[in-house]
Image: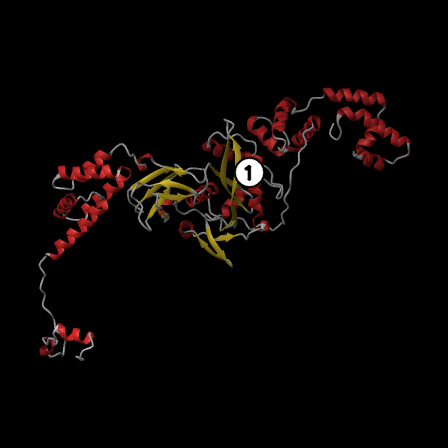
């Protein structure tokens, strides 16, 4: 029926007849009833019998989307904010053979909203129009976030990066189920360039911390990783000013389009399937539908724009980019990453100690003491905030492994039985700190020769000194004694040039000590 409900047809018909008999003009009748003049003319041409007959015929008239009424009604009931465009996309996704026009879907959705009383309100954001740049000149890049329901009914936060060629509006989108890192951003750029088959001559970004350290009057300071990537790819960057939607309106629209048309009310199952579905959506709708502004399909315009992109002359990998990121080790043997604490082996901490971290494709945080050294920690990255992520091997076990630790330390001494008894006594006196005690003893022992550590052990037992710090002090004392007993190596003394040798051998005059005591007591001067 279009403008009015079928149940109201007879009532509207009677009002139109009534207003006409009262002398109202057609325009005035249409305005008072909120209908078009065409509808007024159509009703006036019919008799009451014809109206009743017409109502009966419209009730039985089939529409193309009637077989999908229950499904569409379910979607609208669960998600009242669904747009007719998104419903059209969902129908095409589930029923690829269904061919139906946009206007047909809009009319049918509007009719169902009226029929079942499902209103829809949608805020709109207005942008100032700016001319399109030449083909291949610019792509805009931005990030977005959504919250999705999983198949288990839980809520998960997803993150995406989107690209759009400013001339053709051809889009590329990639998703992660965790926050992006700079390494992720570089990898998505590479995949976007492969998707486009070339590189635009300019990339426009918002001021994102993954890429930009600061911007001062147009001078960009990039993160070290992205600067290395920029140099490698010879990218020309343009950073949009804050609160300036006109300069990045195209990508702002894309971010909103991805959220509202693809992601909204879609159920998340797995990140790989989610990305596959998004690529299919890009082909089907994102790049396949006619653009509202250009009135052209982005996929069609892209066929021409692709020829104007800068060719990808070589493939690069993330390993060719300097991606060394360091973190300071905290006193509790943890490092901070993305607002969470990750454990490193006990004993890693030293003042101002830094370790090197790397985020792998498997969403793991790898920690090394040197940039290319052995791995000391390997954690699955947490999506939460303020959490402590610990490796069980980094946690002290106060009951298991102490005897083995004592046996290991005792191997440093010649008399292992005496050393074991000494260490067992330390264990008895310091049960809560025995690992720290043993670590200090082991470190002090390894720093000196065996003869020194053996003598230090004997001195500690003789004097009843049963603590790691006292053992360390005794080791230092014994070592100084050993050093002082070493013979002095004589060396030839070279005289200064132009100096009389007899002056060098001259000895200063010395006086008896009593002479100085007399001076202090008020005696004669010397």
Q: Secondary structure at mark 1?
A: helix
Q: Please tell me which residue lies in front, 148 or 388.
A: 388
Percent x, y of residue 326:
36, 48
Quarter of the image for the N terminus: give it: top right
Q: Is residue 239 above or below residue 145?
A: below
Percent x, y of residue 113:
68, 29
Q: Please tell me which residue lies in front, 255 or 320.
A: 255
Quarter of the image for the C terminus: give it: bottom left
Quarter of image, res 389: top left
Percent x, y of residue 472:
21, 48
Q: Residues within 10 Å of mark 1 (few under 14, many from 20)?
A: many
Q: Which residue is mark 1?
A: 258
Identify the colour scheme used: secondary structure
Percent x, y of residue 255:
55, 41
Q: Residue at x 55, y 39 (%)?
A: 299
Q: Residue at x 28, y 40 (%)?
A: 433
Q: Please tell me which residue lies in front, 500 or 276.
A: 500
> How many labels sit on residues?
1
Residue 24 left/right relative to 214:
right
Q: Residue at x 56, y 43 (%)?
A: 169
Q: Residue 317, can we see it?
A: no
Residue 54 left/right relative to 167:
right
Q: Residue 195, can we see it?
A: yes
Q: Please tell me which residue lies in front, 182 or 518.
A: 518
Q: Is residue 228 above or below residue 265?
A: below
């Amino acid at each position: 029926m279009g403008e009015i409900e079928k149940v109201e047809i007879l009532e509207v018909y009677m009002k139109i007849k009534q207003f006409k008999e009262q002398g109202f003009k057609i325009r005035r009748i249409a305005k008072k009833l909120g209908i078009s003049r065409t509808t007024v003319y159509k009703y006036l041409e019919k008799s009451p019998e014809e109206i009743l007959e017409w109502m009966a015929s419209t009730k039985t008239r089939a529409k193309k989307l009637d077989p999908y009424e229950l499904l569409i009604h379910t979607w609208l009931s669960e998600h009242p904010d669904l747009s007719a465009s998104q419903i059209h996309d969902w129908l095409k996704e589930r029923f690829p053979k269904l061919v139906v026009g946009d206007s047909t879907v809009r009319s049918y959705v509007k009719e169902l909203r009226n029929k079942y009383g499902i209103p829809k309100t949608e805020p709109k954001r207005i942008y100032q129009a700016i001319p399109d740049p030449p083909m291949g000149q610019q792509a805009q890049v931005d990030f977005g976030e959504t919250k999705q329901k999983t198949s288990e009914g839980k809520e998960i936060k997803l993150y995406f990066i989107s690209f759009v060629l400013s001339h053709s509006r051809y889009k590329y989108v990639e998703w992660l189920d965790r926050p992006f890192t700079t390494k992720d951003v570089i990898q998505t750029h590479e995949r976007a360039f492969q998707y486009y088959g070339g590189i635009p001559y300019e990339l426009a970004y918002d001021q994102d911390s993954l890429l930009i350290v600061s911007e001062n009057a147009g001078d960009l300071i990039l993160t070290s990783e992205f600067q290395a990537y920029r140099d490698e790819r010879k990218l020309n960057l343009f950073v949009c000013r804050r609160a300036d939607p006109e300069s990045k309106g195209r990508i702002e629209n894309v971010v909103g389009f991805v959220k509202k048309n693809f992601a909204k009310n879609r159920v998340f199952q797995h990140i790989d399937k989610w990305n596959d579905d998004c690529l299919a959506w890009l082909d089907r709708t994102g790049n396949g539908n006619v653009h509202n502004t250009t009135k052209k399909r982005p996929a069609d315009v892209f066929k021409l724009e692709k020829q104007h992109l800068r060719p990808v002359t070589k493939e690069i990998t993330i390993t060719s980019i300097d991606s060394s990121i360091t973190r300071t080790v905290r006193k509790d043997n943890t490092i901070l990453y993305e607002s969470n604490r990750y454990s490193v082996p006990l004993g890693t901490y030293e003042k101002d100690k830094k370790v090197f971290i790397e985020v792998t494709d498997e969403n793991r945080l790898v920690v090394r003491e040197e940039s290319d050294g052995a791995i000391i920690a390997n954690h699955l990255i947490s999506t939460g905030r303020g959490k402590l992520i610990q490796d069980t091997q980094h946690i002290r076990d106060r009951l298991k492994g102490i005897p083995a630790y004592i046996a290991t330390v005792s191997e440093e001494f010649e008399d292992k039985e005496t050393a074991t008894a000494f260490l067992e006594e330390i264990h008895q006196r310091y049960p809560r700190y025995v690992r720290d005690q043993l670590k200090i003893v082991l470190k002090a022992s390894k720093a000196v020769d065996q003869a020194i550590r053996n003598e230090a052990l004997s001195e500690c037992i003789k004097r009843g000194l049963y603590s790691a710090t006292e053992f360390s002090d005794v080791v230092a004392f014994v070592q100084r004694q050993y050093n002082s007993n070493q013979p002095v190596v004589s060396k030839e003394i070279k005289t200064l040039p132009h100096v009389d040798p007899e002056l060098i051998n001259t000895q200063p005059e010395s006086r008896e000590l009593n002479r100085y005591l007399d001076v202090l007591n008020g005696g004669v001067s010397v």
